[in-house]
């Protein structure tokens, strides 16, 4: 009989201990915030205006990097900001491009897009002091060389070709 009582107490103790452990391990730790899934709600999408950055190579402008980005961030944090998110993103984008010597837009084969997006996101989060930006997406990316810009400007300056009117029939001198 004593063996049954000891076994019952043992089973109850193990059951209570395992339930306590299960609940304590699933509870949120203090200060720990669950990150929302980046593509399934809970985040706002901040779209930048078109950003045009001159690319300087060998002391002269080689062309222009033109881009538009979309950043994901939590709406509550965006609302608490005293500086507009657009201004911070534009400034950090310029800073990142000019401080990163590996970004050579004159040669398209040297650009690692994933590293570029991750670096921009990490620099923004470092500047803001927390994991603010969850994802960086590119909506538009163009590089125009100085020659392409000149060619386009010349095309706009030339007047359109005048339409030639059909010649009027000459009067016949059949008198």
Image (spheres, rainbow, N blue to C red):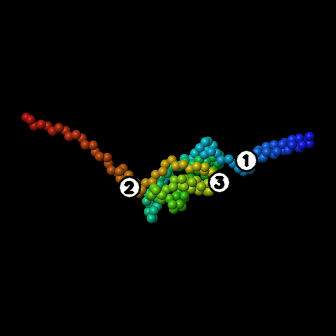
Identify which residue is drawn at 59% across, 55% down: 122
Spatial CA span between label 3 and label 2: 43 Å
Query: Quadrant location of the C terminus?
Result: top left
Identify which residue is drawn at 46% across, 56% down: 109
The image quarter in which residue 6 lies: top right
Callout 1 touching callout 3 (CB < 8 Å): no
User: Residue tagged by mark 3?
Assistant: 130
Instruction: Name which of mark 1 and mark 3 comes first in the sequence.
Output: 1
From this viewpoint, which residue is outermost toward the right?
Answer: 1
- 43 or 95: nearer the viewer: 43
User: Residue tagged by mark 2?
Assistant: 150
Identify which residue is drawn at 60% across, 45% down: 38
Marking on residue 4: none
Expressed as whole percent of the image width and height from the top left, the position of residue 85 reads: 59, 50
Sort mark 3 into few (<14), some (14-19) or many (20+) by Cα contacts within 10 Å.
few
Q: Secondary structure at mark 3?
A: loop
User: Residue tagged by mark 1?
Assistant: 28
Expressed as whole percent of the image width and height from the top left, the position of residue 93 reads: 54, 55
Q: Secondary structure at mark 2?
A: helix
């Amino acid at each position: 009989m004593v063996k049954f009582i000891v076994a019952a107490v043992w089973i109850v103790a193990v059951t209570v201990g395992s339930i306590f452990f299960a609940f304590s391990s699933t509870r949120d730790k203090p200060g720990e915030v669950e990150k929302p899934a980046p593509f399934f709600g809970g985040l706002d999408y901040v779209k930048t205006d078109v950003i045009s950055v001159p690319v300087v190579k060998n002391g002269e402008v080689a062309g222009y990097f033109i881009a538009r980005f979309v950043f994901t961030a939590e709406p509550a944090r965006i609302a608490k900001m005293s500086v507009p998110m657009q201004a911070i993103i534009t400034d950090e984008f310029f800073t990142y491009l000019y401080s990163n010597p590996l970004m050579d837009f004159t040669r398209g084969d040297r650009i690692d897009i994933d590293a570029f997006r991750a670096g921009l996101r990490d620099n923004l989060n470092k500047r803001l002091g927390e994991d603010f930006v969850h994802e960086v997406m590119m909506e538009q990316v163009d590089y125009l060389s100085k020659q392409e810009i000149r060619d386009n400007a010349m095309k706009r300056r030339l007047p359109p070709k005048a339409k030639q009117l059909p010649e009027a029939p000459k009067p016949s001198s059949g008198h």
